[in-house]
Amino acid sequence: MDVTNFTALCDTLNQKVNYKVAGPPKIPFTKLTDLAPIKTVLNRAIPNLPLAYQQQYAKPVLDNLAAGVRTVMNDIQSQNPNDSDAKLLKKQITGLEPFLGAIYDRNVDEIRPQLNRFQAVVSDLYRSFLDANKRTNAGVNLAQLLPALVTFANAADDGPFTITTEQVTQTFDSKIGVVSLPSSYRNHPLLWASLCHEVGGHDVLHADNGLLDELSALVADHFSNDQNQATLWTAWIDEAASDVYGLLNIGPTFAVNLSSFLTTLISQSQPGTAAAIPILRSDIPLNGNSLLDPHPTDLLRIHLALGAVEQLHGLSVSQRTSYIEALTNLAETCAGGLTGITLTDFSTRPPTPRGELPLADMQDAARQVGGLIADSKLNTLNGHSIQDIETWDSSDESIAVLIQTALATDKSIAGLGDDAQVLAGATLALLDNPTPAQYDIVTRRINEALDASFDADPVFGSTLPHHSVFIAKIGATGTPRRARGVCLTCPN
């Protein structure tokens, strides 16, 4: 990978995407004391959901609407005890938006094409972990079968995030997750590779009961002689594992795509940070002695990915070597000569530096964690590794390259691969030619492919009956889908 082209891709994203702008739909309620208008909005949209989601998501939400609204209101009030009533109400409405938007977005014509594409990607990524033969052979079953619902957030403040099945169950007594993207991302499907972290990561991780606890214990044991690393990586385990899951789903290009997203998001959210080279955050934000951000430091996420790539047994040695070299160069470029990870206490004004951890040591630890997550045999998975359920191999890479080649000459990519392969190939194509004109071509072709993917989706597809029960016969209809053996960003 040419790092100069990576920088040019970041420049193109900065030109094309305004991460901070609000977009449709507007939240269709302004108060929470009268639930009747909210019920009316939801009831109008419910018929647009597949029957299984009407029964297993919409009905529990309506049945538990009063209790769910109280839960969200109380949680947000307890987190913001000093806010004015007006400010608190705004946060409470925003807190309810994803739960309810997963229903009412279905009735908004303005965003329907983008929402369908978004849903197709989420469904495809989730179903890739549900291959019946793979899981039966491994003796591993998921507690949740239905893919998460999706919604576009009106404001861009919270970035991409997942509401896990546990959170939805606690709030509205439904076992279906929700994935939210800012509406500002709706016309930029290249950014949706981040969904491999959300639905291919968080949502699936939380569907395999006990998996995160076992991974946390594994990491703690691995760093039993280094309390700092043990504390950090057990605290980061949900986000770290979601990154690794994302990479196993979309391949090593996940790390490149994620890095381009994070660097451009930073340049827009923190004025003055834009530079001739990409910038990734290099600090660990604290609130006193507590971590503020559950994510590994951005700069370490490339090395986390490196550790996983090293364990991709299905990739040829030459392919692994090429990606390891490319990601190593990318990490060096994004470090910009830094030698340490800074601990910064944001409970003071101005924030106070609390020390520094050697960058080389932190990068090495990240690499170890990435390898552990990707390749350890886990009791939760009946003695199998995560790769036994899902991985990226040479066949996937070949399809991604085929898609890359088609995009280079503006040819259709509909049906050439599954959605993860489409996003991987699109990333490769834009690394070859990162111009704004090529970005427009790639975006149009991704949209065509995702339209076809949605149309053939066995859960949501417009040409299929809306079954009341989803049976995971992966690859039975539409693009063949074989098992390939909570917020992405928290700006300071």
Image (tube, rainbow, N blue to C red):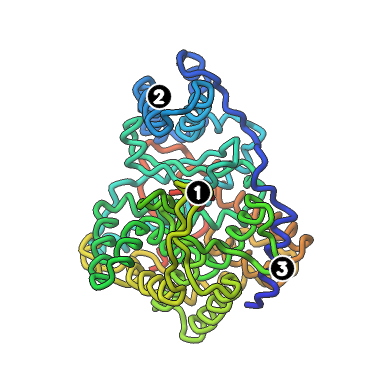
- Write down the residue under mark 1: 457
Mark 3 or 2, closer to the camera: 3
Of the residues under marks 1 and 2, which one precedes in the sequence? 2
Q: Position of residue 87 (x, y in %)?
A: 53, 26
The amino acid type, in three-letter code, at marker 3 is Ala
Q: Is residue 110 above or below residue 426?
A: above
Q: Residue at x 66, y 59 (%)?
A: 273
What is the distance, in whole Å, between disc 3 and disc 2 at their CAs?
47 Å
Mark 1 is on which residue type? Asp
Which residue corresponds to mark 3? 276
User: Residue visible at 55% across and 20% down?
Assistant: 30
- Which element type, helix, strand or loop, lies under badge 2? helix
List x then y, in percent, for residue 85. Answer: 49, 21
Q: Amino acid at mark 2?
A: Val
Residue in the image at 34% along x and 22% along y: 67
Which quarter of the rendered picture does the N terminus lie within?
A: bottom right
The tag on residue 71 is: none
Q: Is residue 327 above or below residue 233?
A: below
- Which numbered mark, 1 or 2, is in the foreground of this view? 2
Residue carrying label 2: 69
